[in-house]
Image: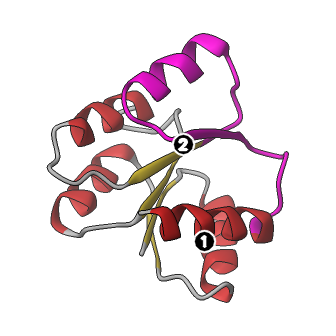
């Protein structure tokens, strides 16, 4: 199961549709607080996480997951690629960083399949 934490409703819908078409169950959270709440109650294999979110940021979201016994694989999906942000996210436990606009929803779904298989 995949959690998509993305505040752009149209983009979140595209990601969820691509994931569903590829056979994944996708849950969407439109802000960081909702994402943390959902991730606290449901075990996800993969989380697709935007960095700039209303409420708590993607970095704060990562800090919330660090202490979990079995954290999900977290893939940052952001329009930003600042090297300091990437380094910080990876040090907080993100597995990878993808830049929006550099992949299609079907390519994202294929990558999620790889990450979920590794979980």
Relative side of 114 to 49, left or right: right
Residue at 48% of width from left, 28% of height from top?
A: 90
Element class at badge 1? helix
Rendered image quadrant of residue 72: bottom left
- Which residue is the site of mark 1? 113
For the residue pair 92 and 34, the one nearer the viewer reads as 92
Magenta span covers which residues?
A: 77-105
Q: Does the magenta stretch include residue 78?
A: yes
2 or 1: tag closer to the N-terminus: 2
In the structure shown, which secondary structural element does the residue marked by tag 2 occupy? loop
Q: Is residue 100 above or below residue 41?
A: above
Task: Check the image and report above or below for 22 versus 58.
Answer: below
At x 83%, y 46%, the residue is 101
The residue singled out by tag 2 in the image is 50
Residue 57 included in the magenta stretch of the image: no
Image coordinates of residue 58 in percent, x first then y, are: 43, 35
Q: Badge 1: few (under 14), some or many (20 or more) residues near its Cα, within 10 Å?
A: some
The x, y position of residue 14, in whole percent, is: 70, 70
Residue visible at 65% across and 14% down?
Answer: 83
Q: Distance between the residues labelled 2 and 1?
A: 19 Å
Instruction: Reply above or below: 4 against 23.
Output: above
Mark 2 Cα shell of 10 Å, populated few (<14), some (14-19), many (≥20) = many
């Amino acid at each position: 199961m995949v959690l998509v934490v993305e505040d752009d409703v149209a983009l979140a819908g595209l990601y969820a549709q691509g994931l569903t078409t590829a056979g994944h169950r996708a849950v969407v959270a439109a802000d960081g607080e909702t994402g943390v709440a959902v991730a606290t109650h449901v075990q996800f294999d993969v989380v697709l996480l935007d960095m700039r979110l209303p409420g708590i940021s993607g970095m704060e979201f990562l800090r919330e997951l660090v202490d979990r016994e079995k954290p999900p694989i977290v893939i940052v999906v952001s329009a930003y690629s600042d090297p300091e942000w990437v380094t910080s996210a990876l040090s907080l436990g993100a597995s990878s960083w993808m830049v929006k606009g550099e992949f299609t929803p079907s390519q994202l779904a294929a990558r999620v399949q790889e990450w979920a298989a590794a979980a």
